[in-house]
Amino acid sequence: MEFLVQFELDIPDGVSESDVEDRETAEAGAAETLAEEGHLVRLWKASVGPSRSTVLGLYRAGSKEELDRLLGALPLYEWMHTSVTPLLQHPNDPAETRAIA
């Protein structure tokens, strides 16, 4: 199954800059591992205001429960506000049409 995951970071007050940097570095490594395993397909950063952005990720997992486990293991997870949308194949998907030709 594929899932669209939207998340924003909310770093609590009082967290040291070095802790944030350490977690961001660990997050990059975790994202690389998820990509290598075929779970993380794409990531985008979208602006939602002058000083805010959100991240959109296309993930693959066998179930919503598996996705929840994958996301819950991310180093930044406790600071994330997430929204997960399961994606279903659309009959007019151009990728599907190209695959048949």
Image (spheres, rainbow, N blue to C red):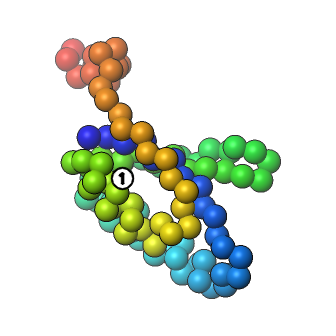
How crowded pointer 1 is (Cα within 10 Å; few <14, some 14-19, many 20+) is rated as: many
Residue at x-position 67% and y-position 84%: 16
Residue at x-position 63% and y-position 85%: 18
Residue 32 visible, this orientation: no
Q: Position of residue 35 (x, y in %)?
A: 33, 57
Q: Amino acid at mark 1?
A: Leu
Residue at x-position 24% and y-position 47%: 63
Q: Quadrant of the N terminus?
A: top left
Q: Which residue is mark 1?
A: 40
Residue at x-position 42% and y-position 39%: 85
- Spot the residue most to the front: 65
* 88 or 98, nearer to the observer: 88
Q: Is residue 69 above or below residue 85?
A: below
Asked if residue 23 lies left or right of residue 93, the reply is right
Q: Position of residue 99 (x, y in %)?
A: 23, 22
Q: Is residue 59 above or below residue 100?
A: below
Q: Secondary structure at mark 1?
A: strand
